[in-house]
Image (tube, rainbow, N blue to C red):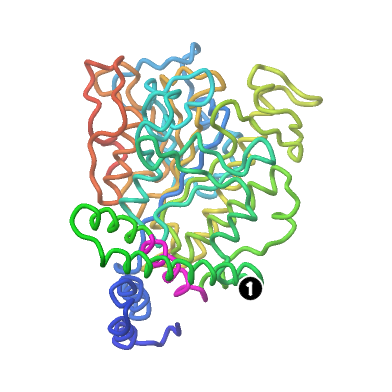
Amino acid sequence: MNTDTTRREMLKLAGYGTGAALLTPILSQLAAHAAGDAKAVARKKIVLVMQCNGINPNHLLPSGVTRPKNGKPTNDKLEEVSLKDRELNKAVEPLAPFKDRLALVQGLSGRIALSDHSANHGALGCFPANKGPMAQTIDCAIGEANPGIIPSIALGMAEKLDQTLNYQLSAAGPGKANPVQCAPELAFKALFGSVSGGNSRAAFDRRTNLLDFMAGDVKRAQDGLAGEEKAKFDQYLEAFENLRDRQAKIDLIKDDLKAHAPKLDDKFKKPTETNRLESQFDIAAAALITGLTNTVLLTSGGGGQHFPAFPELGVPVGGHHYGHGGGVEGKTYEDCFVAVRQYHCKLIAGLAKKLESVKEGAGTMLDNTVIVYLSDSGDGHHPNLLEWPVVLLGDLGGALKTRGRYLQLPAYGTKSHRTMANLYCTLLHAVGKPRDKFGVADPGLKDVNQTGVVADLMT
Protein backbone atom coordinates (compact mmCIF):
# COMPACT_ATOMS: atom_id res chain seq x y z
CA MET A 1 0.00 0.00 0.00
CA ASN A 2 1.42 3.42 -0.96
CA THR A 3 2.62 5.59 1.90
CA ASP A 4 0.56 8.54 0.63
CA THR A 5 -2.67 6.62 1.19
CA THR A 6 -4.67 8.47 3.81
CA ARG A 7 -5.92 7.04 7.07
CA ARG A 8 -9.52 7.59 5.92
CA GLU A 9 -9.00 5.74 2.66
CA MET A 10 -7.33 2.80 4.36
CA LEU A 11 -9.88 2.44 7.13
CA LYS A 12 -12.63 2.66 4.53
CA LEU A 13 -11.28 -0.60 3.11
CA ALA A 14 -12.05 -2.28 6.42
CA GLY A 15 -15.74 -1.47 6.08
CA TYR A 16 -16.42 -3.75 3.12
CA GLY A 17 -16.63 -7.47 2.66
CA THR A 18 -17.01 -10.43 4.95
CA GLY A 19 -13.43 -10.07 6.21
CA ALA A 20 -13.94 -6.57 7.58
CA ALA A 21 -13.70 -7.52 11.25
CA LEU A 22 -10.64 -9.66 10.61
CA LEU A 23 -8.77 -7.07 8.57
CA THR A 24 -9.58 -3.99 10.65
CA PRO A 25 -6.65 -4.38 13.11
CA ILE A 26 -3.95 -4.70 10.47
CA LEU A 27 -5.48 -2.03 8.22
CA SER A 28 -5.56 0.27 11.23
CA GLN A 29 -1.86 -0.34 11.76
CA LEU A 30 -1.11 0.42 8.12
CA ALA A 31 -3.24 3.55 8.33
CA ALA A 32 -1.41 4.66 11.44
CA HIS A 33 1.91 4.16 9.67
CA ALA A 34 0.75 6.25 6.71
CA ALA A 35 -0.47 8.97 9.07
CA GLY A 36 2.77 8.96 11.08
CA ASP A 37 1.15 7.86 14.33
CA ALA A 38 4.31 6.68 16.13
CA LYS A 39 2.63 5.20 19.19
CA ALA A 40 0.25 3.09 17.13
CA VAL A 41 2.99 1.78 14.85
CA ALA A 42 5.52 0.61 17.45
CA ARG A 43 5.28 -3.12 18.21
CA LYS A 44 7.06 -4.66 21.16
CA LYS A 45 9.15 -7.62 20.00
CA ILE A 46 10.93 -10.31 21.98
CA VAL A 47 13.54 -12.66 20.55
CA LEU A 48 14.79 -15.57 22.65
CA VAL A 49 18.11 -17.03 21.49
CA MET A 50 18.85 -20.30 23.28
CA GLN A 51 22.20 -22.03 22.73
CA CYS A 52 22.99 -25.49 24.04
CA ASN A 53 25.93 -26.43 26.30
CA GLY A 54 25.61 -23.77 28.96
CA ILE A 55 26.96 -20.23 29.35
CA ASN A 56 29.95 -20.00 31.64
CA PRO A 57 29.29 -17.06 34.03
CA ASN A 58 32.90 -15.95 33.47
CA HIS A 59 32.03 -15.24 29.82
CA LEU A 60 29.82 -12.36 30.95
CA LEU A 61 32.51 -10.68 33.06
CA PRO A 62 33.55 -7.28 31.65
CA SER A 63 37.08 -6.00 32.20
CA GLY A 64 37.94 -5.23 35.82
CA VAL A 65 35.16 -7.41 37.27
CA THR A 66 35.94 -10.69 39.02
CA ARG A 67 34.04 -13.51 40.71
CA PRO A 68 34.91 -15.60 43.79
CA LYS A 69 37.56 -18.22 43.02
CA ASN A 70 35.16 -21.02 43.89
CA GLY A 71 32.64 -19.54 41.45
CA LYS A 72 29.92 -19.16 44.10
CA PRO A 73 28.85 -15.56 44.79
CA THR A 74 27.44 -14.90 48.26
CA ASN A 75 26.24 -11.31 47.89
CA ASP A 76 22.87 -10.57 49.49
CA LYS A 77 22.36 -7.29 47.62
CA LEU A 78 22.58 -6.24 43.99
CA GLU A 79 26.11 -5.52 42.75
CA GLU A 80 26.10 -3.38 39.62
CA VAL A 81 28.83 -2.09 37.33
CA SER A 82 28.46 0.24 34.35
CA LEU A 83 29.77 -1.12 31.06
CA LYS A 84 30.56 2.36 29.76
CA ASP A 85 34.34 2.32 30.23
CA ARG A 86 34.86 -1.43 30.24
CA GLU A 87 35.62 -3.99 27.57
CA LEU A 88 33.33 -6.96 27.07
CA ASN A 89 34.69 -10.44 27.63
CA LYS A 90 36.12 -11.85 24.40
CA ALA A 91 33.42 -14.55 24.39
CA VAL A 92 30.70 -11.92 23.89
CA GLU A 93 32.86 -9.22 22.28
CA PRO A 94 30.81 -9.20 19.02
CA LEU A 95 28.05 -7.50 21.03
CA ALA A 96 30.31 -4.50 21.73
CA PRO A 97 28.61 -2.24 19.13
CA PHE A 98 25.48 -2.53 21.27
CA LYS A 99 27.20 -2.22 24.65
CA ASP A 100 25.05 0.76 25.63
CA ARG A 101 21.94 -1.39 25.07
CA LEU A 102 23.13 -4.43 27.04
CA ALA A 103 22.38 -5.87 30.43
CA LEU A 104 24.64 -8.76 31.45
CA VAL A 105 22.69 -10.52 34.18
CA GLN A 106 24.18 -12.94 36.69
CA GLY A 107 22.63 -14.57 39.73
CA LEU A 108 19.25 -15.80 38.47
CA SER A 109 18.70 -19.43 39.43
CA GLY A 110 16.72 -22.26 37.87
CA ARG A 111 17.18 -25.25 40.18
CA ILE A 112 13.64 -26.49 39.59
CA ALA A 113 14.78 -27.48 36.06
CA LEU A 114 18.01 -29.21 37.12
CA SER A 115 19.14 -32.08 34.89
CA ASP A 116 22.44 -33.66 33.86
CA HIS A 117 22.49 -31.72 30.58
CA SER A 118 19.61 -29.83 29.00
CA ALA A 119 16.73 -28.56 31.13
CA ASN A 120 14.54 -29.32 28.10
CA HIS A 121 11.11 -27.62 28.35
CA GLY A 122 12.05 -26.56 31.86
CA ALA A 123 14.55 -24.01 30.53
CA LEU A 124 11.76 -21.83 29.15
CA GLY A 125 9.04 -23.17 31.43
CA CYS A 126 10.63 -23.20 34.91
CA PHE A 127 9.53 -26.70 35.84
CA PRO A 128 11.28 -30.10 36.17
CA ALA A 129 13.46 -30.96 33.18
CA ASN A 130 12.51 -34.56 32.55
CA LYS A 131 8.73 -34.61 32.83
CA GLY A 132 7.89 -33.33 29.37
CA PRO A 133 5.87 -30.19 28.62
CA MET A 134 4.22 -29.65 32.00
CA ALA A 135 3.05 -26.12 31.20
CA GLN A 136 3.37 -23.27 28.74
CA THR A 137 6.90 -22.03 28.05
CA ILE A 138 7.74 -18.34 28.01
CA ASP A 139 8.02 -18.04 24.22
CA CYS A 140 4.45 -19.24 23.77
CA ALA A 141 3.23 -17.20 26.76
CA ILE A 142 4.68 -14.00 25.30
CA GLY A 143 3.33 -14.84 21.85
CA GLU A 144 -0.12 -15.27 23.34
CA ALA A 145 0.18 -12.04 25.32
CA ASN A 146 1.64 -9.96 22.47
CA PRO A 147 0.56 -11.64 19.22
CA GLY A 148 1.36 -10.78 15.65
CA ILE A 149 -0.32 -12.49 12.70
CA ILE A 150 1.46 -15.59 13.98
CA PRO A 151 1.63 -15.48 17.80
CA SER A 152 5.16 -16.91 17.99
CA ILE A 153 7.64 -18.57 15.68
CA ALA A 154 10.17 -21.21 16.78
CA LEU A 155 13.21 -21.80 14.55
CA GLY A 156 16.38 -23.70 15.23
CA MET A 157 19.28 -25.88 14.22
CA ALA A 158 19.48 -29.50 15.36
CA GLU A 159 22.56 -31.62 15.84
CA LYS A 160 21.55 -34.06 13.11
CA LEU A 161 20.57 -32.95 9.64
CA ASP A 162 17.64 -35.35 9.41
CA GLN A 163 16.03 -33.92 12.55
CA THR A 164 13.66 -31.35 11.07
CA LEU A 165 11.67 -30.70 14.26
CA ASN A 166 12.70 -30.39 17.91
CA TYR A 167 9.87 -31.07 20.37
CA GLN A 168 11.96 -30.82 23.54
CA LEU A 169 12.24 -27.08 24.21
CA SER A 170 8.97 -25.22 23.64
CA ALA A 171 5.41 -25.90 24.83
CA ALA A 172 2.05 -24.31 24.10
CA GLY A 173 0.59 -25.73 27.33
CA PRO A 174 0.44 -28.86 29.50
CA GLY A 175 1.15 -31.88 27.32
CA LYS A 176 1.40 -29.70 24.20
CA ALA A 177 4.96 -29.68 22.91
CA ASN A 178 5.49 -26.87 20.41
CA PRO A 179 7.81 -27.88 17.55
CA VAL A 180 10.93 -25.89 16.74
CA GLN A 181 11.37 -25.94 12.96
CA CYS A 182 14.97 -27.03 12.29
CA ALA A 183 14.86 -27.14 8.47
CA PRO A 184 15.35 -23.60 7.12
CA GLU A 185 13.97 -24.35 3.67
CA LEU A 186 10.76 -25.74 5.15
CA ALA A 187 10.52 -22.75 7.51
CA PHE A 188 11.00 -20.38 4.58
CA LYS A 189 8.27 -22.02 2.52
CA ALA A 190 5.86 -22.10 5.43
CA LEU A 191 6.31 -18.40 6.24
CA PHE A 192 7.03 -16.87 2.82
CA GLY A 193 5.35 -19.32 0.45
CA SER A 194 2.72 -16.75 -0.49
CA VAL A 195 5.29 -14.54 -2.22
CA SER A 196 7.98 -16.95 -3.37
CA GLY A 197 6.21 -17.88 -6.62
CA GLY A 198 6.05 -21.23 -8.35
CA ASN A 199 5.02 -24.25 -6.35
CA SER A 200 5.19 -22.41 -3.04
CA ARG A 201 2.61 -19.82 -4.10
CA ALA A 202 0.41 -22.50 -5.61
CA ALA A 203 0.62 -24.49 -2.38
CA PHE A 204 -0.31 -21.38 -0.38
CA ASP A 205 -3.37 -20.80 -2.59
CA ARG A 206 -4.41 -24.45 -2.34
CA ARG A 207 -4.10 -24.30 1.43
CA THR A 208 -6.24 -21.15 1.54
CA ASN A 209 -8.91 -22.66 -0.71
CA LEU A 210 -8.95 -25.85 1.33
CA LEU A 211 -9.40 -23.92 4.57
CA ASP A 212 -12.28 -21.96 3.00
CA PHE A 213 -13.94 -25.19 1.96
CA MET A 214 -13.42 -26.85 5.34
CA ALA A 215 -14.79 -23.87 7.29
CA GLY A 216 -17.86 -23.79 5.05
CA ASP A 217 -18.33 -27.52 5.39
CA VAL A 218 -18.19 -27.30 9.19
CA LYS A 219 -20.75 -24.47 9.14
CA ARG A 220 -23.15 -26.51 7.01
CA ALA A 221 -22.83 -29.50 9.32
CA GLN A 222 -23.25 -27.26 12.36
CA ASP A 223 -26.62 -25.99 11.11
CA GLY A 224 -28.15 -29.42 11.64
CA LEU A 225 -26.98 -29.79 15.22
CA ALA A 226 -28.02 -28.42 18.56
CA GLY A 227 -26.90 -28.31 22.16
CA GLU A 228 -23.69 -30.05 23.17
CA GLU A 229 -22.87 -31.34 19.68
CA LYS A 230 -23.22 -27.85 18.23
CA ALA A 231 -20.87 -26.53 20.91
CA LYS A 232 -18.27 -29.16 19.93
CA PHE A 233 -18.48 -28.05 16.32
CA ASP A 234 -17.89 -24.47 17.41
CA GLN A 235 -14.34 -25.53 18.39
CA TYR A 236 -13.71 -27.12 14.97
CA LEU A 237 -15.08 -24.08 13.19
CA GLU A 238 -12.92 -21.72 15.23
CA ALA A 239 -9.81 -23.76 14.45
CA PHE A 240 -10.41 -23.75 10.69
CA GLU A 241 -11.41 -20.11 10.62
CA ASN A 242 -8.30 -19.12 12.60
CA LEU A 243 -6.09 -20.92 10.11
CA ARG A 244 -7.95 -19.37 7.17
CA ASP A 245 -7.79 -15.91 8.74
CA ARG A 246 -4.05 -16.25 9.25
CA GLN A 247 -3.72 -17.01 5.53
CA ALA A 248 -5.72 -13.87 4.73
CA LYS A 249 -3.57 -11.71 6.98
CA ILE A 250 -0.38 -13.09 5.45
CA ASP A 251 -1.68 -12.43 1.94
CA LEU A 252 -2.55 -8.87 2.93
CA ILE A 253 1.10 -8.07 3.69
CA LYS A 254 2.52 -9.96 0.69
CA ASP A 255 4.28 -6.84 -0.64
CA ASP A 256 6.23 -6.45 2.61
CA LEU A 257 6.96 -10.17 2.65
CA LYS A 258 8.31 -10.03 -0.88
CA ALA A 259 10.50 -7.04 -0.06
CA HIS A 260 12.05 -8.54 3.09
CA ALA A 261 11.96 -12.31 2.59
CA PRO A 262 15.48 -13.77 2.59
CA LYS A 263 16.66 -15.24 -0.70
CA LEU A 264 16.56 -19.01 -0.96
CA ASP A 265 20.29 -19.15 -1.75
CA ASP A 266 23.19 -21.47 -0.97
CA LYS A 267 22.83 -20.84 2.77
CA PHE A 268 19.55 -22.69 2.59
CA LYS A 269 20.68 -25.34 0.13
CA LYS A 270 24.06 -26.26 1.64
CA PRO A 271 23.14 -27.66 5.06
CA THR A 272 26.27 -26.90 7.07
CA GLU A 273 25.70 -26.01 10.71
CA THR A 274 26.54 -22.34 10.21
CA ASN A 275 24.46 -22.07 7.03
CA ARG A 276 21.44 -23.59 8.75
CA LEU A 277 21.67 -21.32 11.77
CA GLU A 278 22.37 -18.17 9.74
CA SER A 279 19.38 -18.97 7.52
CA GLN A 280 17.13 -19.22 10.55
CA PHE A 281 18.34 -15.85 11.84
CA ASP A 282 17.59 -14.36 8.40
CA ILE A 283 14.09 -15.82 8.48
CA ALA A 284 13.55 -14.50 12.01
CA ALA A 285 14.59 -10.99 10.99
CA ALA A 286 12.23 -11.02 8.01
CA ALA A 287 9.34 -12.33 10.10
CA LEU A 288 9.82 -9.54 12.65
CA ILE A 289 10.33 -6.77 10.12
CA THR A 290 7.24 -7.67 8.09
CA GLY A 291 5.04 -8.03 11.17
CA LEU A 292 4.38 -11.74 10.73
CA THR A 293 5.18 -12.17 14.42
CA ASN A 294 6.35 -10.23 17.46
CA THR A 295 7.91 -13.22 19.21
CA VAL A 296 10.67 -15.50 17.97
CA LEU A 297 12.49 -18.40 19.59
CA LEU A 298 15.83 -19.28 17.97
CA THR A 299 17.53 -22.44 19.22
CA SER A 300 20.98 -23.86 18.54
CA GLY A 301 21.02 -27.53 19.49
CA GLY A 302 19.53 -28.25 22.89
CA GLY A 303 17.01 -30.66 24.32
CA GLY A 304 18.35 -33.99 25.58
CA GLN A 305 21.99 -34.38 24.61
CA HIS A 306 22.05 -32.53 21.30
CA PHE A 307 25.37 -30.71 20.92
CA PRO A 308 26.18 -29.72 17.31
CA ALA A 309 29.71 -29.53 16.00
CA PHE A 310 30.83 -26.38 14.17
CA PRO A 311 33.58 -27.48 11.76
CA GLU A 312 33.34 -24.14 9.92
CA LEU A 313 34.51 -22.49 13.14
CA GLY A 314 37.38 -24.90 13.64
CA VAL A 315 35.35 -26.95 16.14
CA PRO A 316 34.71 -30.24 14.30
CA VAL A 317 33.58 -32.08 17.45
CA GLY A 318 30.25 -31.91 19.23
CA GLY A 319 29.78 -29.84 22.36
CA HIS A 320 29.72 -32.93 24.54
CA HIS A 321 33.41 -33.45 23.76
CA TYR A 322 34.66 -30.03 24.81
CA GLY A 323 31.97 -29.82 27.50
CA HIS A 324 33.95 -32.59 29.23
CA GLY A 325 37.27 -30.79 28.82
CA GLY A 326 38.35 -32.22 25.48
CA GLY A 327 40.10 -29.98 22.98
CA VAL A 328 40.84 -30.23 19.27
CA GLU A 329 44.01 -29.61 17.32
CA GLY A 330 45.08 -26.05 18.05
CA LYS A 331 42.25 -25.35 20.51
CA THR A 332 41.67 -26.07 24.17
CA TYR A 333 38.16 -26.82 25.40
CA GLU A 334 37.88 -23.18 26.51
CA ASP A 335 38.94 -22.01 23.04
CA CYS A 336 36.13 -24.15 21.59
CA PHE A 337 33.55 -22.67 23.94
CA VAL A 338 34.70 -19.12 23.14
CA ALA A 339 34.72 -19.67 19.37
CA VAL A 340 31.17 -21.02 19.39
CA ARG A 341 29.97 -18.30 21.78
CA GLN A 342 31.50 -15.55 19.64
CA TYR A 343 29.75 -16.97 16.59
CA HIS A 344 26.34 -16.89 18.28
CA CYS A 345 26.98 -13.35 19.47
CA LYS A 346 27.84 -12.33 15.90
CA LEU A 347 24.47 -13.66 14.77
CA ILE A 348 22.70 -11.78 17.55
CA ALA A 349 24.57 -8.57 16.67
CA GLY A 350 23.65 -9.06 13.01
CA LEU A 351 19.99 -9.44 13.90
CA ALA A 352 20.13 -6.34 16.09
CA LYS A 353 21.75 -4.37 13.26
CA LYS A 354 18.97 -5.37 10.85
CA LEU A 355 16.29 -4.29 13.31
CA GLU A 356 18.16 -1.04 13.97
CA SER A 357 18.05 -0.24 10.25
CA VAL A 358 14.25 -0.33 10.11
CA LYS A 359 12.38 2.81 11.12
CA GLU A 360 9.46 2.23 13.44
CA GLY A 361 7.43 4.83 15.25
CA ALA A 362 9.68 7.64 16.44
CA GLY A 363 12.79 5.45 16.34
CA THR A 364 13.83 2.05 15.02
CA MET A 365 12.55 -1.47 15.37
CA LEU A 366 15.43 -2.29 17.73
CA ASP A 367 14.20 0.42 20.09
CA ASN A 368 11.06 -1.65 20.65
CA THR A 369 12.83 -5.02 20.96
CA VAL A 370 14.67 -7.10 23.52
CA ILE A 371 16.87 -10.03 22.51
CA VAL A 372 17.32 -12.53 25.33
CA TYR A 373 20.41 -14.76 25.03
CA LEU A 374 20.63 -17.79 27.33
CA SER A 375 21.30 -21.52 27.33
CA ASP A 376 19.00 -24.48 27.79
CA SER A 377 21.47 -25.77 30.40
CA GLY A 378 22.05 -22.61 32.37
CA ASP A 379 25.57 -22.15 33.64
CA GLY A 380 27.39 -25.15 32.15
CA HIS A 381 27.54 -28.44 30.29
CA HIS A 382 26.71 -30.19 33.57
CA PRO A 383 24.94 -27.28 35.29
CA ASN A 384 24.13 -26.64 38.92
CA LEU A 385 21.63 -23.89 38.01
CA LEU A 386 22.40 -21.87 41.11
CA GLU A 387 23.02 -19.31 38.40
CA TRP A 388 21.59 -18.96 34.90
CA PRO A 389 23.56 -16.30 32.98
CA VAL A 390 21.45 -14.14 30.67
CA VAL A 391 22.28 -11.39 28.19
CA LEU A 392 19.59 -8.82 27.38
CA LEU A 393 20.02 -6.58 24.33
CA GLY A 394 17.45 -3.81 24.02
CA ASP A 395 14.96 -2.21 26.40
CA LEU A 396 11.63 -3.12 24.80
CA GLY A 397 10.51 0.43 24.15
CA GLY A 398 11.80 1.69 27.49
CA ALA A 399 10.04 -0.99 29.56
CA LEU A 400 13.34 -2.53 30.72
CA LYS A 401 16.49 -1.09 32.31
CA THR A 402 19.13 -2.70 30.14
CA ARG A 403 21.39 0.09 28.99
CA GLY A 404 25.06 -0.64 29.63
CA ARG A 405 24.73 -2.64 32.86
CA TYR A 406 26.48 -5.61 34.46
CA LEU A 407 24.37 -7.02 37.30
CA GLN A 408 25.23 -9.62 39.92
CA LEU A 409 21.85 -10.22 41.52
CA PRO A 410 21.58 -11.48 45.14
CA ALA A 411 22.92 -15.02 45.47
CA TYR A 412 20.90 -18.20 45.74
CA GLY A 413 19.24 -18.58 49.12
CA THR A 414 19.50 -14.92 50.14
CA LYS A 415 16.33 -13.04 51.00
CA SER A 416 16.23 -10.98 47.79
CA HIS A 417 17.23 -13.77 45.40
CA ARG A 418 15.47 -13.92 42.01
CA THR A 419 14.91 -16.87 39.68
CA MET A 420 14.39 -17.39 35.96
CA ALA A 421 10.65 -17.46 36.68
CA ASN A 422 10.98 -13.88 37.94
CA LEU A 423 12.76 -12.91 34.72
CA TYR A 424 9.94 -14.40 32.66
CA CYS A 425 7.37 -12.56 34.77
CA THR A 426 9.39 -9.40 34.06
CA LEU A 427 9.06 -9.95 30.29
CA LEU A 428 5.32 -10.53 30.59
CA HIS A 429 4.93 -7.34 32.65
CA ALA A 430 6.97 -5.48 30.03
CA VAL A 431 4.61 -6.48 27.20
CA GLY A 432 1.59 -5.42 29.22
CA LYS A 433 0.33 -8.81 30.44
CA PRO A 434 1.41 -8.91 34.10
CA ARG A 435 1.89 -12.25 35.76
CA ASP A 436 3.54 -12.75 39.14
CA LYS A 437 4.02 -16.52 38.99
CA PHE A 438 5.51 -18.65 36.25
CA GLY A 439 6.20 -22.37 36.24
CA VAL A 440 6.89 -24.29 39.45
CA ALA A 441 8.43 -22.78 42.57
CA ASP A 442 11.86 -23.99 43.73
CA PRO A 443 11.37 -26.02 46.96
CA GLY A 444 14.93 -25.13 47.94
CA LEU A 445 13.89 -21.49 48.28
CA LYS A 446 10.95 -21.99 50.63
CA ASP A 447 12.00 -18.97 52.74
CA VAL A 448 12.34 -16.72 49.67
CA ASN A 449 9.42 -14.90 48.05
CA GLN A 450 9.62 -16.30 44.52
CA THR A 451 6.74 -14.25 43.06
CA GLY A 452 6.92 -11.06 41.03
CA VAL A 453 9.44 -9.48 38.70
CA VAL A 454 13.15 -8.70 38.78
CA ALA A 455 12.63 -5.15 40.03
CA ASP A 456 16.18 -4.13 39.11
CA LEU A 457 15.35 -4.71 35.42
CA MET A 458 12.06 -2.79 35.38
CA THR A 459 11.80 0.92 34.64
Magenta stretch, overall SS: helix
Chain part drawn in magenta: 240-255
Can residue 3 be seen here?
Answer: yes
Q: Residue furthest front?
A: 224
Residue linked to disc 1: 197
**Is 364 above or below relative to 171?**
below
Q: Front-most of 154 and 45?
A: 154
- Circle 1: element type: loop
Residue at 44% x, 39% y: name it.
177
**Is 67 above or below relative to 12?**
above
Residue 258 in the figure: left or right of residue 124: right
Q: Residue 358's spot in the image, x, y percent?
A: 49, 66
Residue at 25% x, 54% y: name it.
229
Q: Residue furthest top?
A: 70
Q: Residue 124's spot in the image, x, y percent?
A: 41, 35
Residue at 30% x, 51% y: name it.
145
Tally of marks: 1
Q: Residue furthest right?
A: 329
Quadrant where the image shows the N terminus: bottom left
Can residue 459 be seen here?
Answer: no
Q: Residue 26's spot in the image, x, y percent?
A: 35, 71
**Is 29 above or below relative to 242?**
below
Q: Front-most of 416 and 437?
A: 437
Q: Is residue 138 magenta?
A: no
Badge 1 crowding class, 10 Å Cα cut-off, few under 14, some 14 to 19, many 20 or more, is few
Residue 457 in the figure: left or right of residue 213: left
Q: Is residue 248 magenta?
A: yes
- Identify residue type, mark 1: Gly
Q: Residue 269's spot in the image, x, y percent?
A: 73, 55
* Residue 165 quadrant: top right
